[in-house]
Image (cartoon, helix red, strand yellow):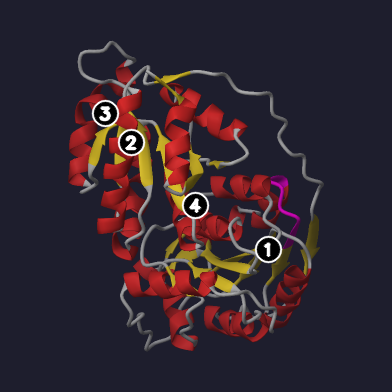
Amino acid sequence: MINADDFLGPARQEGFDFYTGVPCSYLTPLINRVINDPANRYVGAASEGEAVGIAAGAWLAGRQTVVMCQNSGLGNAVNPLTSLNAPFQIPTLLVVTWRGQPGLADEPQHELMGQITPALLDTLRIPHMAFPATADEIGPAIAAMSASLNETRLPFAFIMEKGSVHDDGLSETTPPVRPSGTRTDLSVSAELPTRYAILERVLAAVPDNAAIVASTGKCGRELFTLADRPQHLYQVGSMGCAGPMGLGVALNSDRPVVVLDGDGAALMKLGAFATIGAMGPDNLVHIILDNGVHDSTGGQPTVSPSVDFAGAALSCGYAGAALANDPDGFEKAFVAALEKPGPHLIHVRIRPGSLDSLGRPTLSPREVADRFKAFLAEPNSTTG
């Protein structure tokens, strides 16, 4: 058994100081010490997949990241690990607990996952080794992990057995209380605009120093068709992770960060609203392009007509939320959001459909990630 600082200190020397995840009793000592230590940053996520997205955004903004979760949570993380980290080649350290480890008594819900945890990581092509349980194992383990991340630019996992880390307890913390945000309704009686028309307004109003994360599907493809720029990140998978990725970027950059989300994608990880609101990045604008359908898969309806995205955002701690259903109203809301501390949400209703000759990004996901990361690393400016 080791103390949490025995691991966290050497990990920090290797640059790992941004942690996110979902708690497990095995992880309690590690998470509590991260929370207590001002040298580290911890973001508690609503789901493991969300945590992977947050870490991906933080890595793009220059941080070395750690995602901590129970092995059962690997099920929630499979999609972003395979459709975000893999194609974009975004590394992160996973600390995964081994509940249901063969030979140890545990709750019945952990039995199957305990049997398959190493094999599941193998299937995901994620190299792994045991979390260091003694002081002399820490240095070699961190060196092996760091070498793997640098060589492959893909995730690496430590599997943590029960009782690996001594529990020092958690200092009492008081969650921040955010004041109620402002709701603005700019809806008018008019024909709903196209996604393309709204994206045109985004590009017309967004500052040149802003980063834009576009959700998977036709949103990113239309943005690429309109203008391909280094500050654009086109998700090609990981549905629902645009908001978490944007949060990871916004927490680690002083640039404006704009998230272009879809109604179906936002609904998939609605818990991310709560994480964004709690973290309160004042440089984040979250736009929901709501056409009421899954446009990329044949137009099947979503449940968005009955969802108050603006109300949900305000309930979760966003500083402001606006509704719009035409380009002028949207642009007014967007400009206002850029001028005031956020996070802000803009829910804009649009009509289904997209350009007839809709192309796809011609750069590989890794090329998109590399130039986006390089853009974020450049000195910031405020040109509009």
Question: Dot 1: within a 10 Å radius of its alpha carbon, few (fewer than 14), some, or many (20 or more) residues?
Answer: many
Estimate the spatial distance between the alpha carbons at disc 4 and disc 1, rounded to whole Å: 15 Å
Disc 2 to disc 1, C-alpha distance: 38 Å
251 is within the stretch colored magenta: no
Residue 257, quarter of picture: bottom right
Give the x, y percent position of residue 44: 55, 39
Task: Find disc 3 in the rendering and name its residue.
Answer: 113
Looking at marks 2 and 1 on the same chain, the residue that comes earlier in the sequence is marked by 2
Q: Are marks 4 and 2 in contact (CB under 8 Å)?
A: no
Callout 2: few (<14), some (14-19), or many (20+) C-alpha neighbours within 10 Å?
Answer: some
The residues colored magenta run: 315-321
* 253 to the left or right of 323: left
Given this view, does label 2 or label 1 mark the residue nearer the observer?
A: 2
Residue 382, image x, y percentages: 70, 78
Nearest to the eye among marks 2 and 3: give it.
2
**Nearer-N-terminus badge (2/3):** 3
Kindly indicate whether the residue at mark 1 contacts the one at mark 4 (C-beta within 8 angstroms): no
Q: Amino acid at mark 1?
A: Asn
| Residue 250 sits in quarter | bottom right
Q: Secondary structure at mark 2?
A: helix
Q: Which mark is residue 283?
A: 1
Q: Which residue is mark 2?
A: 139
Specify whether residue 131 is in view: no
Give the residue type at disc 4.
Answer: Ile
Q: Is residue 253 left or right of residue 100?
A: right
Q: Secondary structure under badge 3?
A: helix
Task: Identify residue type, mark 3.
Answer: Met
Query: Which residue is rendered at x = 53% and y = 69% of the image?
Result: 291
Residue 34 got which mark? Answer: none
Q: Which mark is residue 54?
A: 4
**Figure quadrant of the C terminus:** bottom right
